[in-house]
Image (cartoon, grey):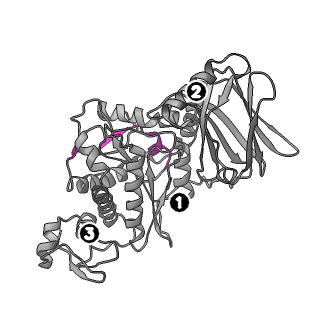
Amino acid sequence: MSRLRRQLLLLLLVLSPGPGCADTVIAGLRVWHPPQSTRLVFDLSDPVEFELFDLSDPKRLVVDMRRALVLGTLPESSALGPYLGGIRYGSPKSETLRFVFDLKQSVGYDAFLLPPEGTYGHRLVVDISPLEVEAVDRNRLKPGKRARSFVIVIDPGHGGEDPGATGRRHTREKDVVLAVSKRLSRLINGEIGMQARLTRDRDYYVSLRGRIDIAVREKADLFVSVHADAAKRRSAMGASVYILSNKGATSEIARQLARRENASDLAGGVQLKDREVSVREMILDMEIDWKIRESRDFASAVLKELGMIGPLHSRKVHQAGFVVLKAIEIPAILVEMGYITNDQEEQKLANSLHQERLAAAIFRGIKEYCRQERDCPMVGNSPALYTVKKADSLSLIAARYGFTVQQLRSENALSSDRLQVGQELILPER
């Protein structure tokens, strides 16, 4: 259907009198599948009055909307996830549109409206989760010797209904940080004695409390939250690294950034009062001095490596009250990889080679911190030789190990950039 015909049909449906009259048009229904839950998102033309309740024999979840109509397609039953068996809708009474979801098991549920944000318009969000969810181990994380891998939790910021910052070329922060985080995860998992865990591996939203829970459940030793910065001044550029402050932000920029990142739960659909309670509960017995000291050492190592591949917004580690850094008792940093609102940096952040450089710089910072930390596994220096693998390129290898392509060419006397699988390359000293 052409865009013009669609708009005309929408106009006729909304303005026509009688039973078809509607205040809100449902343009579609999207489904997200975060771990241990399902999120339904109704895309709306306007806010809507709604009611959510469940029925038994058989189990069903019902969403009633007042003076609404459906325009667009609904997902197939197979796309509804593990808790929902089917979907149908109708009008049980005048001015009421009813959606009925068949349930495969008993679930908990919640619903709320979200205002327009970024590329999204008005939305009605329905969150569904099983009632029998395995309890999260909330034992405090203590440093100590272990006969297990050293676990680094990587937290790609934003996701799902929360796009984060958006550049002029429509590059979204949530996409860039996920791409870099996946690359960083692969590098960490390639190091003997280290394991990476992602708070999300796809495009869905995880609450700030949920990110903390993942770090606790995985018994993380380090926590890295990955973001891209934004500013009204488009000339602002460069990477920054932040740690938690227990005495207030170290600069106005840090204060504004913490305010923006801490508001992420509002964009993702989490009530602030719930989050504040959880932070108060978990921060009571934090070993804050040890954590901030270790976090500063960790942040300094990462900041130094980021400065080797591009400009820094500040050569100083900044502090602010980031919620996602507060409630875990391990060294934790928040990396702002650059300003997505700067045209040049937006282009770089969307580039796969630059994403590899960023991931590699953070990884080198992790290794440098680990060389000074007794609980880290023994971390060796970069290998002197590299064996070319499938899909490798000279530029990719250079980005991964922090060299220029010209340095690799010169060290290996290469007359072209063509490589063969199994070929050995000498890596320059750093």
Residue ID at (25%, 67%): 401
Q: Is residue 115 above or below residue 360?
A: above
Specify few, some or many for label 2: CA neighbours under 10 Å numbering under 14, 14-19, or 20 or more.
some
Which of the pair 362/2 is nearer the observer? 2
What amino acid is found at the position of numbered circle 3 in the picture?
A: Ile
The label number, if any, that marks residue 124 in the structure image:
none
| Cα distance in 3D space between marks 3 and 2 | 53 Å
Residue ID at (21%, 75%): 418
Element under disc 3: helix
Rendered-image quadrant of the C terminus: bottom left
Residue ID at (32%, 40%): 169
What x and y, as percent, mark residue 414? 14, 77
* Location of mark 2 (residue): 10
Question: Magenta: predominant secondary structure element?
Answer: loop
What x and y, as percent, mark residue 28? 60, 37
Frontmost of labels 1 and 2 is: 2
Frontmost of labels 3 and 2 is: 2
Task: Give the left or right position of residue 133, taking residue 188 as reference.
Answer: right
Mark 3–mark 1 CB contact (< 8 Å):
no
Give, as a single range, the part of the protein colored magenta: 311-328
What amino acid is found at the position of numbered circle 2 in the picture?
A: Leu
What x and y, as percent, mark residue 126? 65, 38
Element under disc 1: loop
Specify few, some or many for label 3: CA neighbours under 10 Å numbering under 14, 14-19, or 20 or more.
many
| Residue 309 sits in quarter | bottom left
Residue ID at (35%, 31%): 256
| Cα distance in 3D space between marks 1 and 2 | 52 Å
- The reply to whether residue 225 is in sight is no
